[in-house]
């Protein structure tokens, strides 16, 4: 990751929707896509709102599209509780998070927690990857969640 900012390399924009199929239909109509399924790997050490949870309890339907420049569009339909469902309840759907690539997610997590960002969700992927969601919703904020992520080879569908 270039520089010391955790926000140096935009990886993807995450949208949360009530109905994945309807959302993809609309996004395809707009000329986005093709959308491909997310290749889940074994998840471990998963925490939701500070509590350890069984990774299989986090149920999401996810499709991704490469929108150019190394940036992806991630469309998520939550099937259970978590920051995704809370966003749907509060906002009805839309852009949920901006995700930034990091070589060392743990180091970036420590730095952001020291700056006062609360961790909403964290997960480690078998093979050395990880993702952490941070609450970025302050009064007047434009985005609710920031994600720091390191993918494991084979997770992306291309």
Image: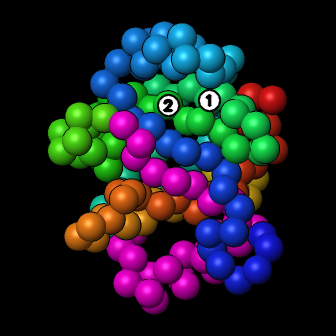
Q: For residue 64, which numbered disc appears in the image?
A: 1
Q: For residue 146, which numbered disc appears in the image?
A: none
Q: In the rendered view, would you say 86 is above or below 141? A: above
Please tell me which of labels 1 and 2 falls first in the chain.
1
Give the spatial CA distance, label 1 vs label 2: 6 Å
* Quadrant showing the N terminus: bottom right
Residue 22 screen position, x and y as percent: 40, 12
- Residue for badge 2: 75
Q: In the rendered view, would you say 119 is above or below 27? A: below
* Quadrant showing the C terminus: top right
Q: How crowded is mark 1: few (under 14 residues within 10 Å), some or many (20 or more)?
A: many
Q: Is residue 101 magenta?
A: yes
> Which secondary structure, mark 2?
strand
Which residue shows up at 50% across the image and 31% down it? Answer: 75
Q: What stretch is highlighted in magenta?
A: 94-119
> Which secondary structure, mark 1?
strand
Which residue shows up at 63% across the image and 60% down it? Answer: 100
Q: Quadrant of residue 39?
A: top right
Q: In the rendered view, would you say 88 is above or below 4? A: above
| Residues at discs 1 and 2 in contact (Cβ within 8 Å) | yes
Furthest-bottom residue in this view: 114
Is 80 placed left or right of 154 in the picture? left
Q: In the rendered view, would you say 80 is above or below 116? A: above
Seen from the viewer's position, the closer of residues 91 and 131 is 91
Q: Quadrant of residue 35?
A: top right
Residue 17 screen position, x and y as percent: 36, 29
Q: Is residue 142 magenta?
A: no
Residue 71 screen position, x and y as percent: 70, 44
- Asked if residue 58 shows in the view, the reply is no
Which residue shows up at 58% across the image and 62% down it? Answer: 148
Seen from the viewer's position, the closer of residues 154 and 19 is 19
């Amino acid at each position: 990751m270039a520089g010391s900012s955790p926000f140096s390399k935009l990886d993807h924009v995450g949208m949360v929707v009530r109905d994945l199929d309807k959302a993809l239909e609309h996004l395809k109509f707009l000329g986005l896509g093709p959308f491909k399924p997310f290749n889940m790997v074994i998840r471990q050490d998963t925490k939701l709102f500070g509590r350890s949870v069984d990774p299989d309890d986090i149920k999401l339907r996810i499709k991704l599209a490469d929108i150019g420049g190394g940036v992806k569009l991630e469309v998520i339909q939550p099937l259970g509780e978590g920051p995704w469902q809370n966003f749907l309840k509060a906002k009805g759907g839309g852009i949920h998070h901006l995700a930034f690539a990091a070589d060392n997610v743990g180091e970036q997590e420590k730095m952001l927690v020291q700056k006062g960002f609360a961790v909403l969700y964290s997960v480690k992927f078998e093979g050395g990857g990880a993702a952490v969601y941070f609450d970025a919703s302050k009064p007047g904020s434009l985005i609710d969640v920031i994600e720091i992520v390191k993918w494991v080879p084979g997770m992306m569908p291309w």
